[in-house]
């Protein structure tokens, strides 16, 4: 739903707004890519709590949420983005191994 809302807003030629209601949302990696067609500001109003998935197998890169190749994006609202780092930190074995892949936390 997040990705579909972004695609629709990015295709809008005006000043679109994405509203994230006051609920909890568990999401895996998200990529909000441009360029977008909007001539004004694309606003994302976050009122809920967006939680990162703790399933590390979902992450093919280090990004949880990525905004790339976009201009005039505004994040606002009373909500939060929670990467749930405390769930991933115990899985980080880099301090004990010479070769390791840093977790996308």
Image (cartoon, rainbow, N blue to C red):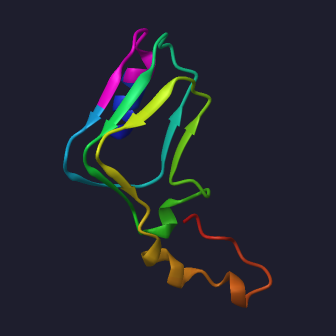
What quarter of the picture does the N terminus occupy?
Answer: top left
The residue at the far right in this view is 98
Q: Residue at x 43, y 77 (%)?
A: 87
Provide residue 81's location: percent of width, then percent of height: 39, 54
The answer to which of 61 and 14 lies nearer the viewer is 14
Q: How many marks?
A: 0
Instruction: Look at 57% across and 53% down and name the residue there.
Output: 63
Please state if 32 lies on the left or on the right of 2 as rendered. right
Look at the image and say whether residue 10 sits in the magenta stretch: yes
Q: Residue at x 37, y 33 (%)?
A: 44
Residue 33, located in which quarter of the rendered image? top right
Residue range highlighted in magenta: 9-18
Q: Please give the name of the residue rendered at 58% of the width and 64% of the height, measured from the top-left corner.
A: 104
Q: Is residue 46 above or below residue 50?
A: above
Locate residue 79, reporting x and y percent: 30, 48
Would residue 17 appear left or right of 23 to someone viewing this image? right
Rendered location of residue 27, percent (x, y): 36, 54
Q: Quadrant of residue 82?
A: bottom left
Q: Nearer the viewer, residue 31 or 22?
A: 22
């Amino acid at each position: 739903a997040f990705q579909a809302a972004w695609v629709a807003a990015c295709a809008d030629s005006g000043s679109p707004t994405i509203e994230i209601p006051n609920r909890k949302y568990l999401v895996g990696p998200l990529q909000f890519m441009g360029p977008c067609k909007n001539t004004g500001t694309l606003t994302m109003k976050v009122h809920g709590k967006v939680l990162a998935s703790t399933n590390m197998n979902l992450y093919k890169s280090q990004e949880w949420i990525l905004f790339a190749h976009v201009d005039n994006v505004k994040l606002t609202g009373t909500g939060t983005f929670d990467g749930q780092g405390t769930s991933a930190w115990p899985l980080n074995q880099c301090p004990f191994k010479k070769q390791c892949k840093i977790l996308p936390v």
